[in-house]
Amino acid sequence: MTLNNWEREISKFMKKKSRNGRIIESESPTSTIIRTGKSKELPVTDFYIINYELLYKRLSDLSKLNIKTIVCDEVHNLRSKTTQKYKAVKKLAALPSLSYRIGLSGTPIFNRGSEIWPIVDILRPGLLGSFKEFCEYFCYVNDKGKAIVLENKRASLRNELQKHVMLRRKKSDVLKELKDKVRYKEIIDSDTDYYFEELGKIWTKLEGEQKDAETAFDKSASYQRAIQSERQIAGIAKLPHVINFVKNIMEIEESVVVFCHHKVIHKLLNERLQEFSPVSIIGGQSDNFRQDQIDKFQKGESKLMIAGLRAGNVGINLTRAKYVIFAELDWSPAVHRQAEDRLHRIGQKNTVFAYYLIGKDTLDDHVANILVDKSYEIDTIMD
C-alpha cells in the first residue's frame, strides 16, 4: 500500500471518539508522510507514515517522538536480519516508549520457514530464542547453507506462532462470497536452439570470470549474473508461445493480466501485443502514471495489463480480470501468490484462473520444482 493510501485509510477508519464512544465526525487523526531522508524535526501528529527504505535515515528523528505503537505493513520485507531496514525497525521497536508492535502480511514467509525468525524477533523478542537457538531446534542447513525448517518441526512451529504472535485468517474464513482460485501449470514449447546457443555463451563467460575472480564475493557475483542471464533467455525462448497463449485468452474478450520479470520481456510483450492497446506497470513509473494505468484497466478502457512481477504484485487492485498469466517465474512462491491476489480479493465476483507457463527443456523446469518444494514448506508452517 502506498503512503497516500495509508493516509487516506487512516482518515477514513480512525475517526476520533468522545469519552462516551461516539464518533466526532469533524475530527480525524493527524498524519505526517515522511518522504525525504534529510534529518529534521518532525511535527507532532497522531501518525507518521514512512517507507522502510527511509527509516534508517530518520530513525533519530522518530526516536524523539514518544511513539507508542509501530505497524509494519508487508512485514515480510523484514525477513532478512542483515538489511538496514530490519536493523532500523529493530531499534525503533526497542524504544522504551513503545507498547505495541504489529506486523501485517498475507505472505509472511517468502521462500523458507526460517524467514519467520527475524519478523518474530521484532514483534515478540525472544519468543523463538536467538537465531542460532531457533536453527538448532527447528532447522537443518541444506547444501547451499540455507536454514530449512525440519518437516517434523513445522507443526510445532506453527502452533508456537499461533499461540503467541500470529493471528492467521484465510480468505475462505472472512470472504465467504469470494470464488475459488484455480492454478494451471502449462508446459509450452521453447526455442531450444536459441536457448542452448545463448546458454553456452553465458557459461563460457562465467568460466572466464570464475578463473579471474580474486575473491569469493567476485565468484558469487559472477555466478548470480549468469543465473539471471539464463532466466532472461528462458523467457525470450518461450516468448512466441507466450504471445500465442495470451492471444488465445484475449479472443474470448476477457480482461487479462500478464506478469513477467525482466524489463526486456515486458517491452517485447508490449510491442507484440500492441493490437490490444495494453496498459502496464513496471518499476520506475510515477505514482500518478501507475494509478492511471490501473484505473484504465479497472474501467475496461484496456483489457490487457502487462505488469512486472515485483512492481505489480502488491498494493493494487486488478479485479476487472479473472485470468492471470505468468509469462516468467519468480524464485519465491509468495511473489506469485501476491500477484494472483491482485485479482483474487474483495470485489472479485468470478473464479480466478492462474496460468503458469513453463518453458519446456529450459531453466523453468528447475525453478518450477524449487517452487513446489518451497510452497510445501511454507504451507505446512502457516496453514
Image: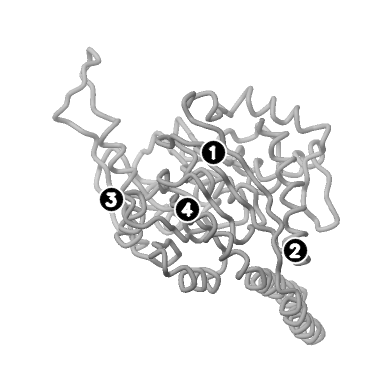
Mark with earlier residue (3, 1) = 3
Alpha carbons under labels 3 and 2: distance apart: 55 Å
In the image: residue 173, left or right of residue 18? right
Choose top left, top right, bottom left or bottom right for residue 19. Answer: top left
Residue projecting furthest to the top: 20
Label 3 element class: loop
Mark with earlier residue (1, 4) = 1
Q: Which residue is mark 2?
A: 360
- How many residues crowd mark 4 within 10 Å: few (<14), some (14–19), many (20+)? many
Q: Quadrant of the C terminus?
A: top right
Front residue of 17/378: it is 378
In the image: residue 108, left or right of residue 154? left
Q: Which residue is mark 3?
A: 42
Alpha carbons under labels 2 and 1: distance apart: 31 Å
Alpha carbons under labels 1 and 4: distance apart: 23 Å
Q: Which residue is mark 4?
A: 256
In the image: residue 292, left or right of residue 184? left
Number of marks present in the image shown: 4
Q: Residue at x 25, y 43 (%)?
A: 44
Q: Which residue is mark 1?
A: 106
Type of amino acid under label 4? Val
Mark with earlier residue (4, 3) = 3
Front residue of 241/7: it is 241
Type of amino acid under label 2? Lys
Task: Give percent across and percent down for residue 13.
Answer: 29, 31
- How many residues crowd mark 1 within 10 Å: few (<14), some (14–19), many (20+)? some
